[in-house]
Amino acid sequence: MSGRTDNALQSRTWSWTFKNPPAAMWPLLADTARFNEAARLPRHKITEIPQGDGSVAYYGDAKVGPFAIKWQERPVNWVAEQFFEHIRDFSSGPLRLLGAHLALRPDPASGGSIGTYTLTAAPRNWIGRLLLATKFFSATADTFGRMVAEADRFAGGETPTIFTYAAPEITAETTAKVARLVAEIEATPNGHGLAQRLADHVLRAQEVDLWHVRPIGLARLWQVPERHVIELCLQAVKAGLLELRWDLLCPRCRVAKAWVGGLDRLPTGAHCSSCNIDYDRDFSKNVEASFRPAAGIRPLESGEYCMWGPMSVPHVRAQIHLAPGETRELPGSLGAGPYRLRTLEPGPSVDIVHDGSNFPALVIEDDAVIAGAAPAEGHLRFTNHSRQARIAVIESRHWVADCLTADRITALQAFRDLFSDDVLRPGDEVSVGRVALLFSDLRASTALYQQIGDASAYHLVRDHFAFMADIIRSHDGAVVKTIGDAVMAAFARPQDAVAAALAIQHRIAANAAASGRPIVIKLGLHQGPSIAVTLNDRLDYFGSTVNMAARLQGQSLGGDIVLSQEMRDDPAVAPALAGFAISAERATLKGFDQPLTFYRVTP
């Protein structure tokens, strides 16, 4: 540790050696909201004020002991897995300035990493001078030293939680109520033996993990199928353990800036005060189903622990403030993949696909952002040629990894069964970027009734609906509606639709062999963009994708599966079709002007 005093600025630096590399330590130490909550720092309120040049000024206020503290947040600078720096300028309270700088670098000797943390502070008054002269730095050293050691142990798999955290006290009444809810959830097909784990998470997790309970993230943590946790959370809403809300995520910061309790109240767009932009909604992109504890089980208090931590926007791999005419070259490298180069302020951007070699420079002009010549290996370069100070941003274009988008959850049978009344308001239409649709029909159903009689045929058809629904549900799909002897089903992923179709034909063949009562199913599948609407009091789909899937079912001979070109060419579908006979055919389908190629799969 080293220290110095310079014009009332005082700083201390601490270094630690970690057993784990920077890639493992970064998401833990850069999660400043989680860090601050575990360190028992107070919540604070953030006010965002748009500026004339399109930027946004961020102000915070909090009550810390006897002090009412107000400050202005400077946007955080960081390069992922390298460093972050955060500065607050105070207008009230004992301090004038507080800054933190964390740097990580590999430790070749151990295979781990070395972390260096510098805390800088300047007093506003005699109370601040007394605070800095006594316990401020030593208390910080004790707290941070303990917490970074806990993070290192968690990164190495030695502990189940990142930081030591004291959850709120649970009353005997709440404990008994939760036990009843757990039993109620497990009595349904959607519990999957996970209800107690979910209850423990709700009662004991840090608040930062409960503001947005994301089932996909829990499934990865618990190492169980995603559908099981999604169904669990849906059933937990019905039981009263969780609440469901629909978030409208900003496409830049990917934070929910509008949210509602039902799809019938979903706005057509929203304004992000952090990014100072207006944006629209898309079921496949930025309408997210998220969960949080029911207020009667564990109420969450309002307020932020940290607005500008790097892990609050983990898709942003670098964010650097640049003065007019400034160039900064910093250590860092980014893996191959799709990226967007832009500024934090509203304005132009450029999309690139990086091949994993030297990353191109981010260059800001007055009216453009461009990808410039790459710097030396292991470095990132940022240049501001504009006349305004700007904040350069490099973001991954991969969408929120754990986001349960509306197109996916509404294509699950559990949602359709439990929330059949959660529909769009009449006349509302929402775009769906992609949905996979399956249409089925019984071949020669009229002849079947004549052959075996009405009663037997009715029971056979009813059984066929039941097992088809089971197969569709088990393949992460949902029955949208039945039309006579036909079924329309939706899937968020095309590979699930194809796997379900193959399972249906396999089941039909097995039943026929066992019963001697053959029924023949015709199947057609297509994927593409669609419009979600409410028809006959249920969520439905409308558009040419629906028409195409229905027409392809008409091309089926029975016992086969007819796929559109879009389904057949999807790389995710190829493994499911391996080993099956596939023939290409061409025909003009009703409602379509040009002949279309489709593929017949013979299981």
Image (spheres, grey):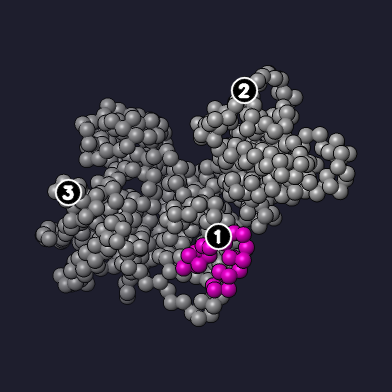
Query: Does the magenta segment cover residue 515?
Result: no
Q: Is residue 386 visible?
A: no
Q: Which residue is mark 3?
A: 107
Q: Position of residue 320 (x, y in %)?
A: 29, 43
Residue at image location 63% in from the left, 53% down from the top? 415
Q: Could you tell me how far apart the alpha carbons at marks 2 and 1 are, in whole angstroms?
A: 40 Å
Provide the major secondary structure of the magenta segment. Answer: helix
Q: Could you tell me how far apart the alpha carbons at marks 2 and 3 are, in whole angstroms?
A: 57 Å
Indicate which disc residue 583 carries. 2
Other-residue count near label 3 (Cα within 10 Å), few / some / many at <14 / 14–19 / ≥20: some
Please name whichever residue, 255 or 437, is drawn nearer the observer in this view of the structure.
437
What is the secondary structure assignment of the residue under circle 1? loop
Q: Earlier in the sequence, mark 1 or mark 3?
A: 3
Query: Does the magenta segment cover residue 180?
Result: yes
Q: Earlier in the sequence, mark 2 or mark 1?
A: 1
Q: Label 3 is placed on what type of residue?
A: Asp
* Stretch in magenta: 178-200
